[in-house]
Amino acid sequence: MAKDYYEILGVAKGATQDEIKKAFRKLAHQHHPDKKGGDESKFKEINQAYQTLSNTQKRQKYDQFGQAYGQPAGAGPGGVNWDDFSRASGSGPFGGGFQSGNVEYDFGDLGDIVGDLFGFGRRSGRRRASQSAAGVDIQAEMTIDFREAVFGQERVIDLYKQINCSHCQGSGAEPGSKIENCKTCGGQGQVERVQQTVLGAFRNVTTCPDCHGEGKISENKCKECRGEGRKKESEKIKVKIPAGINNGDTIRLAGKGEAGVRGAGGGDLYINILVTPDPNFNRVHDDIISDLDVSFTQAALGDKVPIVTLDGEVVLKIPAGMQSGKVFKLKDKGVPHLRSRGRGDHLVTVNIVTPTHLTRQQKKLLEELGN
């Protein structure tokens, strides 16, 4: 029995989209096949669960039908798709298009039902081919330092992946080779045949085996990519890191994933950002938190103390009689907001350092001060 999608991602059934996304990222990092110790089958399982639960409509159907969802829509016992019986119009037990006797049946949407029952379907071969030919999404990790995350930066990432063939420009045809309509399907990308079943004769529409659903075929395949229109090579990709990005955030680059077959759409590239900590600053959301130690004398008499911020050194005025634990706010000295204008603040907590080794004179002065 197939695993429950919620169980695969390790989230509760009532999990929010943020919780689902966070769980997916964690597991994807752990099991990505390009990483040492990765598990491709587990990664695909995780991705399938996420693709369903991250889509509101798909998730509603999954919650309603449970494990039945993920089979052909409406699949009933034995894998028979009864989903569209109600769509057929007209009289008779199966709606319009049904006639008794050994004649051809035309169920419209009901063709999917029969296809599931006898191992074929009516869905568009060209549409199915274009979907399968599209490039897949890929993930990568990028480690940046604290200040790059705060102020943004442009970096270059080098990935080994499927890219469009430079020799044929992604067409799959040898340059100068003649491209014409496929003779097998007449340029339709799909072929039709009639299959005899216990219910009669059914039309079966499948992807053309010669042009693979594209409707066109080249005289000579590209010698570099063998007709695929793509090949595995290293590609350098510029990545613009936006100011204010945080550890664990993801940058999506549309179309920068795996290239599709023969010019089909490329997948997306998801870059998971890892930020190295800074010894001087602690980030909480978009605020910067730091501590400042001052002497007993400075706290009692007041002083002007230099402090390092993201924008450089500034002078912080310590008022006389200040108590330990006082927090000063340096407005707009924090991290730029990622999705809006403005910046966070820099919060400085002042700690009074009590002297541990006093001379006799210092002790006497403190005693006099206490009196």
Image (spheres, rainbow, N blue to C red):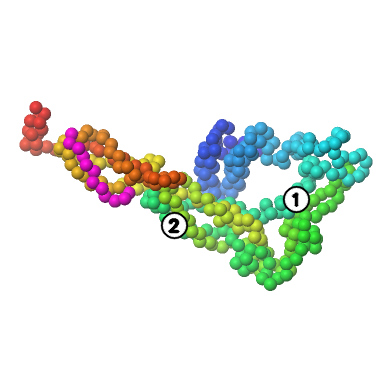
Find out whether the residues at labels 1 and 2 contact each other: C-beta distance under 8 Å: no
- Badge 1 density bin: few <14, some 14–19, many ≥20, Cα 10 Å: some
Q: Position of residue 90 (x, y in %)?
A: 85, 36
- The answer to which of 146 and 322 lies nearer the viewer is 322
Q: Position of residue 304 (x, y in %)?
A: 19, 44
Query: Disc number at residue 124?
Result: 1
Residue 130 sits in which quadrant? bottom right
Q: Residue at x 44, y 45 (%)?
A: 340
Residue 89 sits in which quadrant? top right
Q: Position of residue 209 (x, y in %)?
A: 76, 57
- Residue 231 drawn above or below residue 38: below
Residue 246 appears in the figure: no
Q: Tag 2's secondary structure?
A: strand
Q: Which residue appears farthest toward the front when viewing the image?
A: 341
Task: Return the disc, 1 or 2, that comes first in the chain's sequence.
Answer: 1
- Residue 235 drawn above or below residue 7: below
Which amino acid is tagged 2?
Glu
Q: Which residue is mark 2?
A: 154
For residue 272: magenta?
no
Q: Position of residue 22 (x, y in %)?
A: 51, 41
Q: Residue at x 78, y 52 (%)?
A: 206
Task: Decide if residue 2 is on the left or right side of residue 20.
Answer: right
Which amino acid is tagged 1?
Ser
Task: Decide if residue 234 is on the left or right side of residue 200.
Answer: left
Q: Which residues are magenta?
A: 310-321
